Image: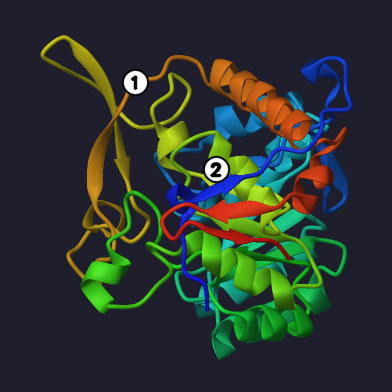
Amino acid sequence: MEVFDYEDIQLIPNKNIIKSRSDADTSVKFGPKTFKIPVVPANMETVIDDDLAVWLAQNGYFYIMHRFQPEKREGFIKMMHSKDLYASISVGVKPEEYEFIDQLVADNEKPEYITIDVAHGHSDYVIQMIHYIKEQLPDSFLIAGNLGTPEAVREIENAGADATKIGVGPGKACITKLKTGFGTGGWQLAALRLCSKAARKPMIADGGIRYNGDIAKSVRFGASMVMIGSLFAGHEETPGNLISIDGKKYKQYWGSASERQKGAYRNVEGRQMLVPYRGHISDTLNEMEQDLQSSISYAGGRKLNDITKVDYVIVKNSIMNGD
């Protein structure tokens, strides 16, 4: 099996066919809606909150609200729907989550998107939750993860998930591979490529994104959407605390499996850190769109899916590859 990560890959240009890069279409249909770019902020407490979710939905971007304030989720759905915006929430697999789904059904609150968000998604408990949600809320677009193997993708898709989330511990705040010896950290892009061979439904590439060009690489290897944590955590609109050190600004960022998030040192697979302050998130999203338009032009295409057709080089091995 070829093993590589984002920094090991360069995509090979094709003849440009558009007059201006601004003519390239970066939009993507994901579930019932179409979004400006194939990018979603990580569903983490230091990356997304109510206000940012509203802004993203109003401006044509995908979001997934985190699951770390479970008592507020139904109110969040009602709030989004009252503004005529779509609702996208996260759930776990504990018994009380079944009660939450029952409550949504009883109150006729139907979120457009639901993400089953657990660290190791290839699990009987995730499959049981998929079955339950699809029975109770069949019209909700159901995302399940996180996964890292073709076998997991096949089984989770066959259970009824509408999309899968790929990545076991490759994020900047993740220490899964150090703590457990397992995961896709260090070969996340190769894992995505491997999973794409089995996938028949959309995939979200989750973790390991360090540069805007990694978004195009994710699309090349099968991602319909790309989840980004650390690159988004440092913005004015993100929830982490703003801290100044020696005249430089930073924002707090911590992993979903960190001691800070859990409130106790128990099965910790994440860490807390500071990320550089990056100003307004709208500027970063615009830059990502423009860079992706450039990627499409280099791919010799007009639309996002054209990136999937290009060849690539594994730089560290100097081996030419193509599918």
In the visual, does 266 lie left or right of 131?
left
Where residue 293 appears, as percent x and y from the top left, is 73, 27
Relative to 16, residue 110 above or below: below
Write down the residue under mark 1: 277
Q: Nearer the viewer, residue 14 or 52?
A: 14
Mark 1 vs 2, N-terminal side: 2
Residue type of the residue flagged with mark 2? Asp
Q: Left or right: 14 with respect to 315? A: right
Name the residue carrying label 2. Answer: 214
Element at badge 2?
helix
Which residue is depicted at the point 70% across and 40% down? 62
Quadrant including the C terminus: bottom right
Q: Quadrant of residue 157?
A: bottom right
Task: Assess disc 1: are there few (<14), some (14-19) or many (≥20) residues with their C-alpha within 10 Å of its C-alpha.
Answer: many
User: With respect to residue 276, does 11 lie above or below?
Assistant: below
Left or right of residue 312: residue 82: right
Residue at (44% x, 61% y) in the render: 317
Q: Which residue extends farthest bottom?
A: 124
Residue 278: x %, y % from top left:
40, 19
**Numbered label attached to residue 306:** none
Percent of width and height locating residue 238:
45, 29
Quadrant of the image occupied by residue 274 = top left
Residue type beneath disc 1: Tyr
Q: Could you tell me which residue is drawn at 34 percent across and 49 percent down?
A: 172
